[in-house]
Image (tube, rainbow, N blue to C red):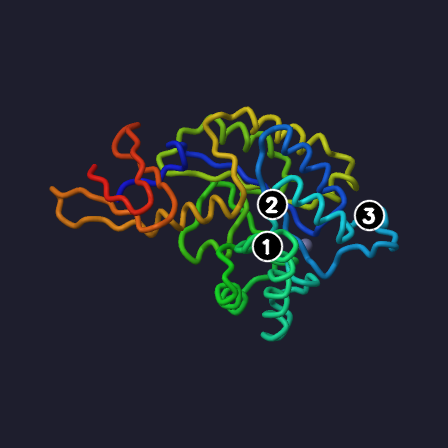
Amino acid sequence: MLKMRFPNGLKKAFTLSYDDNLVDDIRLMEIMQANGIKGTFNVSSGLYCGENEDPGERWPRLTYKQAVEAYNKFGVEVAVHGYVHRDFTKITEPELYLEISLDKANLERDYNCVVRGAAYPYGGWNETAIHALKHCGIKYCRTVWCDPNFTIPSGDGWLSLKATCHHDVPNLMELAKSFKEMDPREAKMFYVWGHTAEFRNNKNWHVIEELCEFMGKCNDVWHATNIEICEYCLAYEKLEWSTAPDTRMVYNPTAKEIWLEVWGDKVISVKPGETVKY
Ligand SMILES: [Zn+2]
């Protein structure tokens, strides 16, 4: 098997994941757009702020109208975060299925896409939750666990996805710099998560502004949403390989063009439905 590369032969990907459909998501999306950063917003569609309700100062949520307008306008990925944000590990199975599938259905209606991503409310996950997510057509679900090694999961590992870090870690920019400088043997992903109300409460918008500006200038990094990276990696896993050592062929049964490292820095791509000799 040849090593996976990201589109255009890149070895590294960067993405963001922000939860809770908050008013400050709009400011983050403006920062992302200005720097060419892509990412995902995890929405509890049963918890929009009422049209005539005071959203408060600490954790202000978007109204339904504001959310639909903003997430559609910026073209970000919208993903499941539980209909009313109940901990997936503390509810019955019927409640769990409702939290996932009702949120998914609402988002699909409002954002015109088949939703395939999620983040665990409160980070709570277990095997029952993974099973339910799979049954509901969810391909990845982000936990609040972190792995600073930029590791990319495989298969069902995407359903207990670890971020690289929360944006509040003191070494955020050191991680960003080491990611920029690394020339990894395997493809790597830098994944940062949080809540935009934290920037408001901690008065530290500069943290994400600096990160987005820095990462936006990295030309050898694929800037993509969570689902774009996940589904690209899952498509790579679906490649079919010839068997004999002198018939090196790879067949791509998926709908995505997949990039592979042949040797050294030589890279090939296999288009959908194509068989390529290498
Ligand atoms: Zn949340």
Does the residue tagged 3 have its C-beta within 8 Å of any atom of ligand 1?
Answer: no
Q: Identify the residue position indicated by label 3 in the image.
A: 58
Mark 2, secondary structure of its residue: strand
Q: Residue 85, how many percent across, how many down?
A: 68, 61
Q: Is residue 200 left or right of residue 236?
A: right
Quadrant placement of the C terminus: top left
Q: CA distance from mark 2 to mark 1?
A: 9 Å
Q: Nearer the viewer, mark 3 or mark 2?
A: 2
Mark 1 Cα-neighbour bin, 10 Å: few <14, some 14–19, many ≥20: many
Q: Identify the residue position indicated by label 2 in the image.
A: 17
Identify residue type, mark 2: Ser
Classify residue 215 by image quadrant.
top right
Are the residues tagged 2 and 1 within 8 Å (C-beta)?
A: yes
Q: CA distance from mark 1 to mark 3?
A: 21 Å
Q: Which image quarter has ligand 1?
A: bottom right
Q: Residue 262, how many percent across, how many down?
A: 26, 34
Q: Residue at x 52, y 55 (%)?
A: 116
Q: Is residue 135 above or below residue 31?
A: below
Q: Identify the residue position indicated by label 1 in the image.
A: 119
Mark 1, secondary structure of its residue: strand
Q: Residue 9, how many percent across, how many down?
A: 37, 32
